[in-house]
Image (tube, rainbow, N blue to C red):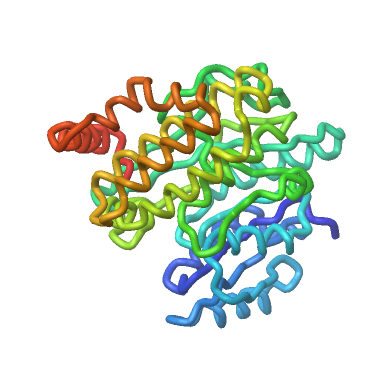
Amino acid sequence: MSKIVTFAVPCYNSAEYMDTCIQSILVGSNYAPDVEIVIVDDGSFKDNTAEKADEWAEKYPDIIRVHHQENGGHGTAVLSGLAEARGTFYKVVDSDDWLDAGAVATLLGKMRTTEATNAHVDLFITNYVYEHTADDTRHVVDYHGVLPEDRVFGWREIGRFKMSQNLLMHALCYRTSTLRAVNVPLPAHTFYVDNIYAWVPLPHCERLCYLNIDLYRYYIGREDQSVNEKIMASRIDQQMRITRIMMEAYHIYDDVRPMQLRSYMVNYFVVMMAICSVFSRLSERPDAMDELERLWKDLHEYDRRLWRRCRLGIMGQGANLPGSVGSSITIFLYRIADKIVKFN
C-alpha cells in the first residue's frame, strides 16, 4: 500500500525514550497501513537503541523500517529519513518527544482528504506543546488568528506572527517531494539544524494547511538537552554556523515573495542573530566575541538591508549593548525574558 506519511524518528542512544515516541505514533494512527515510521539509528553505541529499533521493525514490518548509519548528527539523520521516506508527507519526531493520539488521527484524516481531492498541500502546520520538566507545566504554541484554519491557503493570507509563534520543526509536516526539491543544507555533527529545516524550505511551499490541534509534545528543561543554556553557550560556534547557512540561503529582500512570508522570515532571522549575540556573551570560548563580530561583518557585506533590520532594531540593540556593563545588561534582559517565555 502507498504511504500517506512518513514519520522519521532520529535516534541516538535513545533507548530510554524511543518506545514512548514510537508507540504514540502507532496508537495515534491506529496502526494504519498507509502510515510508515522510519527509525534512524544514528550510530548509537551506549545503549540498546539499535536492537530496540530492529525489534520494532520486526514486530510491525508493514509499518516500521530501520535505517542504521554511522553517527552523523541530527541533521544527517533527518536527511537519511527523508531519503528513505515512501510517504507523500514527511514529519520528523525526535525520539525523546511524542505525538498526541487524537491529533495524529485528525492530521491523517486531513491528509487523506486533501490528497483524494488533489488539493496538493506542500506544508501542514500544527501546534506544539512545551512540556517543562522542571515545574511540570505546559505551554502551547498555536497559530490561531495568524493562519487560516482547516483549509488550503497561501502566504499572502497569513497574519503577523508574534516572536513566540515561530514555525519550528515541531510544527511542520512537509510534502516529501517539495522538501526533497529544496536540497536542505543540514551539516553533519552540528546542533540546531532544525532552524534551517524550519526556515529554508518555506519559500518553496506554495499551498499550506493549518490545523489548530496540539500534535507535538516537546520535552524541555532537561540538563542534557541541546537547548540547555550552558550547552548552548558552549556550542555557540555551531549556532553561528547554522545562522550563516541561513543567511547565505537567500538575498531575502530580493528572493522571497510574497511580502508576508518575507516579513516572517526576516523576524525569525533577527531572533537568530540575537541568540548568537547573547550566547556569545554567555560563552566561555575565548574566540566567541571575535566570531560574533565576524558574523555581523559578513552579514553587513552580504545583505546590508537585513543587517540594518537585525542590528539596529530593538532586539538587535538590546542584545549588543557595548562594553562590560552593556554585556551584563544584555544578559540580565535575556534572563528576564527566559523566566517569562521559558526558552530552556
Q: Position of residue 196 (x, y in %)?
A: 56, 45
Residue 290 horizontal side relative to residue 171, left or right? left
The quadrant of the rendering that contains the N terminus is: bottom right
Instruction: Decide if residue 285 is on the left or right side of residue 206.
Output: left
Give the residue displayed 52% in from the left and 51% down from the top: 193
**148, above or below 191, in the image:** above
Residue 60 position (above or below residue 319): below
Residue 243 appears at what percent x and percent y? 48, 43
**How far across and down, in percent of the image, does residue 285 sit?**
27, 56
Taking the spot 43% from the left edge, 41% from the top edge, the residue there is 295
Residue drawn at the location 31% of the way across and 57% of the way down: 234
Q: How many marks?
A: 0
Q: Relative to the observer, which residue lies in front, 155 or 249?
A: 249
Figure quadrant of residue 322: top left
Residue 223 left/right relative to 5: left
**x, y percent for residue 15:** 46, 74
